[in-house]
Amino acid sequence: MKKYTAAAAAIVLAAVTACGADGSDGAGDDGTLTLGFAQVGAESGWRTANTESIQRAAEEAGIDLQFSDAQQKQENQIRSIRSYIQQDVDVIAFSPVVETGWDAVLLEAQRADIPVILTDRAIDSEDDSLYETFLGSDFVEEGRKAGQWLVDNSDGPTNVVELQGTTGAAPAIDRKEGFEEVVSGSSDIEVIATQDGDFTRSGGKEVMEAFLNSHDDIDVVYAHNDDMGLGAIEAISAAGLEPGEDIRIITVDAVRAGMEALAEGEINFIVECNPLLGEQLMELVEQVAAGEEVPERIEVEETTFTQEEAEAALPDRQY
């Protein structure tokens, strides 16, 4: 694993706001670290909570945060990363929109001696020297948990429709893989349709409307995040059916809106994906900037929720 010298870590820039860089250059003299963070976008309640956690933690840690919103476009993230390289920030972190296509820009960061941290989503690259560490969830395991609940709570033939996340995104690929790995062992469970809902509520509603028009035998919806599941609820209700009863719904995330729907019985089961990565990320930023070695992969602890568990957890839920 590549190490970075204390001298390189001491390079600092003029302070910028947590909402975005102003393109200015220059070094400070107070030892403050500068982090360039390229976020996926604001596609869901989960992402909003993730962004707020990062911004709050940076402020508390005294780290100057240059923040960009890629609006779910890879080219925007690559542009932001190149901007951070030009500004010679101390550390770059980002949540990749998709898994592939990062080698060129990360090689530029490596040549500039700027360490990179992946958060929330991993990349598909044969060169793991291009980044220092990954901080986030095991998406395959999340899919397995969703699939296992369905296996444990199904009796007889069960037709499933799947609302996938953004095509090419790590959580979409992995949550599908983990789910299929488990349910494929049950001859009664069949995924009859799967389509990209782009992790958005509007996308989930639109795809679910299409599923309902094409299939009159849907028993279960498996949504790769809460927002798409909430969109599916709207479509199911508009079709005169009762979400959670006529069609059961499984989602991933456990943001407040999803948990409320679970507590009300409109969603049947949620697999948690913790967005509150800010504090851990800032600790990693300080470590890699100081040239310390860190684990190649750091996974956050997560759980699952039934209706009763959601009711109990909601009063103290942070997101």
Image: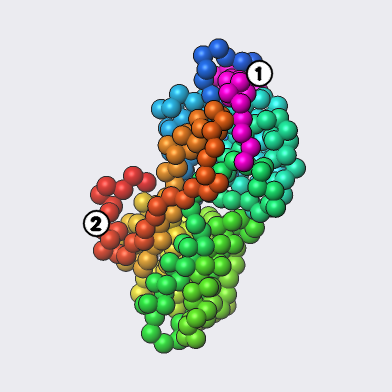
Q: Main secondary structure of the magenta part?
A: loop
Residue 256 lies in magenta, yes or no? Answer: no
Residue depicted at 38% across the width and 85% down the height: 155
- Magenta residues, as a range? 1-25
296 w.r.t. 179: above or below: above
**Does residue 220 appear left or right of residue 85 in this picture?**
left
Q: Position of residue 316 (x, y in %)?
A: 27, 47
Name the residue tied to disc 2.
312
| Residue 94 seen in the current view | no
Q: Residue at x 42, y 72 (%)?
A: 148
| Rendered view: 180 above or below 139 | below
Say how the picture is coloured.
Answer: rainbow
Q: Nearer the viewer, residue 23 or 278?
A: 278
Secondary structure under badge 1? loop
Q: Residue drawn at (46%, 34%), measured in percent from left and top?
A: 283
Q: Nearer the viewer, residue 296 or 92?
A: 296
Under circle 2, the secondary element is helix
Disc 1 to disc 2, C-alpha distance? 50 Å
